[in-house]
Image: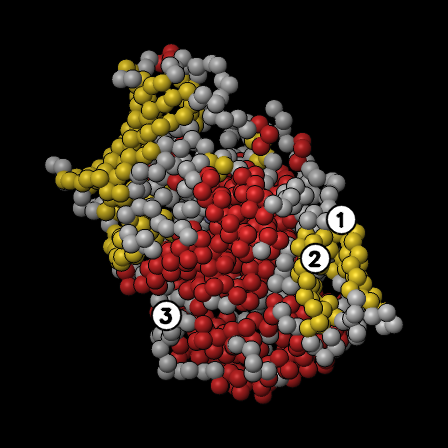
Amino acid sequence: MEKNMHQPRTTYLKDYKVPEFLIDTIDLEFELEEDITKVKSQMHFTKNSASDYTGSDLILQGEKLILKSITIDGEILDAARYQVDDDSLTIHSVPDQFILEIITWIKPQENTELSGLYKSSGNYCTQCEAEGFRRITYYLDRPDVMAIFTTKIIADAALYPVLLSNGNLAGSGRLDNGKHWAKWEDPFKKPSYLFALVAGNLEYIEDIFITKSGKSIDLRIFVEKGNREKCAHAMHAVKKAMRWDEEKYGREYDLNMYMIVAVSDFNMGAMENKGLNIFNTKYILAKPETATDDDFVHVEAVIAHEYFHNWTGNRITCRDWFQLSLKEGLTIFRDQNFTADTTSRTVERIRAVNDLRTTQFVEDAGPLSHPVQPDSYIEINNFYTSTIYNKGSEVIRMMQTLLGKKVFRTGMDIYFERYDGQAVTIEEFVKSMEEASKMDLTQFRLWYTQAGTPIVEITDSYDAKTHIYTLHVKQTCLPTPGQPDKYPLHIPVQLGLIDEQGNQILEKLLQITKEKQVYTFENITTRPIPSLLRHFSAPVKLKYDYSDADLALLFKHDTDPFNQWEAGQKFAISHILNLIKQRNNNQKLSVDLRFIEAFKHILLNTKHDKLFLATLITLPSERYLAEQMDVIDVEGIHHAREFLITQIAKNAKDILFKMYQHNHNIGHAYEFNMKEMGHRSLRNICLFYLSHLPDVHFRDLCVRQFKDAMTHNMTDTMAALHCLVNIDCHEREAALESFYTKWQHDALVVNKWLAIQAESKLPNTLQTIKKLMQHPAFDIKNPNKVYALIGGFAYRNPVNFHQAEGGGYALLADTVIKLDLLNPNVAARMVKPLTDWKRYDEHRQALMKAQLEHILAQKKISKDIYELVSKSLLLTKKEEVTER
Ligand code: TRP
Ligand code: ZN
């Protein structure tokens, strides 16, 4: 990267060409030694008849490799036949068909990028997506080159008793000198990004799954010593996901064995390598004492996600990385439906929409906005974004809404049937849906190529004489980098009409296709209130001028539970924005009693299940409130929201306290099920409100819950600690200290301890972060710790991160610079909060920009950081990015 730092190469979708050569088989042999790992790769190459390439140069990718030897058809190549540079190996005048053998040496123990083969807690593991395989050996490292892999691993038997790779075990044995070996064969063709290898001193738990056609599958979860007792939940989730994919999509597992390995150093959540998923420990290990309800849910979701990739990603893979959403958007869609089916449809939808609106909408409104199918990138690692994943999932969901569930499933069947074993594009997916539905999705395809969040503005009128109700719909989309002009999209808007008593008059799916459209409804006998975009039927910003009275009515009565929640959120937002205005006019803040009344009404309504009720009474996050403002008023948002929380607590103190007591189950053993989770989340949101009152009584309540729960229930422990950590009192310090003392040897729990402090709203938090960065519990080389401490601060603590003196920005920039030398992928994930500088006031803008410039001025920076920082400083407009 250093050599042409100011002009890293951009890759364009329009330049895609089929590979010039194909690889039919690859036989790998790894000798793992402490100082060096020897990799022998034998590959069968053939010229690709579909390519128009007439030359005879073979270009392979490779990075940070020590090349030892090359042979073609058994003959050693002399140096004149090939050329090596920093990222490739070119071999001249190769025949149309040949066997290439390459020996390279690598040093996994020095790999801090955690890409390719590396060591985590003394064990070897791999991460090859997207372009990590080239850090193991020279290869055609692109997803449309699919080969049959066999892998032989040789290692010290005492240090690395477990030797794993993709597919089925074909043999193993002992060697002299204390070594042993294992050979794995994967019968399915696959791209190199799905390759995996693990060697280590691991324990496992096992189980069996019988597929619907009666095949028995061995399931194994491997973990570091001492963690086996935390795997039961994960194993249960594997079986649940396997059954679900059979029932919902008719998809069965296809190997004899399904293995998961959990490692503590991992850049992302998990990886779907064929037959051998590698997971971040965060998404495997869970027991009641150490994991919260949210953790339990996430473990299930990530396990389901990686398992579902076996069909949507592995059996059918991506032609090139511009198609990333083909597997990721679709697989997120599948795991969201799995979670909806196994937990609560509405609560899961609310979670997904909150996530979309606080990450994807923000991304889409900023300098890094890109379409679900991008048209260029500098570093592909930068495109594992919320747009690719979450908006990609929304696009699939809209197709399901437009086609109906049954026809959508037919489309999925066509897709699986027709493209199994191939590397395809998003177009093949859309074509399958068109064929199933006979619908023309030409306009719909724009969702894939046009960036930006559409704005749907709706106005209405009612004629009491003619009983006609009219809706005027207008869609627009703001320009995004490289896309100044936007076209109208095909938008499904699920509509309900509610009368003033709260009864539903009708429900209908509107299909918006033009910039402006008018809908009329006859025989509407009273003025209706529209319930728009039900279940969040499209990823758009909806604008309709609801009165507070309408919102209060929908909050109480909307028959679409998602929109019922949404009405409460809108009501709260309107109130909080008002409070911010009062604050900026130096007025005394005054609470709207109608809001309090609606809030109490919901609280006393016994018909809702408790999990949903807890969600209904949770105020919009500071991040989502920020999304509502042209210039983000960080302090205004924080203070207005805190004021409202305190007012709610004051005005509903008795009900909240009663509910807290009624849902308390001290002494009960923790159980992970929806009913118990509902109790816990309702009780804990009540405690959260009450903890905002000055009464010591409520502080004691937090302390008591903290102490009672600490031995057996992390959900309640964390909920109490979360309250205490925002109160400046000695109980806070005592709780943090006893928590650390108890859990200092459990890395995942220590990360919670780091995160909860990083997210504290108390004014001295920046100092605390600096101190914690020096604490033995922190390690800048471990991504989970960076995400907990630095991520917690920069992403989830806006008041402190954006403090006016700029100390938060400086801390983040310095950390990003350090991280970039170790692990660019993690550095790039951490720099993003600075890239949205345009959304803040001029003073903050200047401070943020100065830090971005400081990062860019470093002598050595990665492509990852270069791309994000230069794009966010608008140094490179999208189209101007170095056409070379
Ligand atoms: N394919 C993985 C998933 O979404 C994503 C992933 C895991 C990844 N590790 C990575 C992507 C490292 C890039 C780099 O399930
Ligand atoms: Zn994925």
Along the viewing direction, whichever of 471 and 803 lies nearer the viewer: 471
What x and y, as percent, mark residue 802?
Answer: 63, 57
- Reply above or below: 441 against 569: above
Q: Of the residues under marks 2 and 3, which one precedes in the sequence?
A: 3
Disc 1 element: loop
Give residue 355's quadrant in the image. bottom right
Which residue corresponds to mark 2? 510
Mark 1: few/some/many CA within 10 Å (<14, 14-19, 20+): some
Disc 3 element: loop
What x and y, as percent, mark residue 448?
Answer: 61, 43
Residue type marked 1:
Lys
Decide if residue 112 is in sight here: no
**What is the CA distance from the residue labelled 3 to the residue labelled 1?**
52 Å
The residue located at (68%, 40%) in the rendering is: 481
**What is the CA distance from the residue labelled 2 to the residue labelled 3?**
45 Å
What x and y, as percent, mark residue 688?
Answer: 54, 76
Which of the numbered marks, if any, corresponds to residue 288?
3
- Reply above or below: 515 against 705: above
Residue type marked 3:
Pro
Decide if residue 532 is in sight here: yes
The residue located at (31%, 38%) in the rendering is: 187
What x and y, as percent, mark residue 431?
Answer: 57, 41
Residue type marked 2:
Leu
Which residue corresponds to mark 1? 514
Give residue 708's quadrant in the image. bottom left
Along the viewing direction, whichever of 188 and 401 lies nearer the viewer: 401
Q: Of the residues under marks 3 and 1, which one precedes in the sequence?
A: 3
Along the viewing direction, whichever of 123 and 273 lies nearer the viewer: 273
Q: Which of marks 2 and 3 is in front?
A: 2
- Residue found farthest to the left: 176
Question: Does residue 543 appear left or right of residue 269 in this picture?
Answer: right
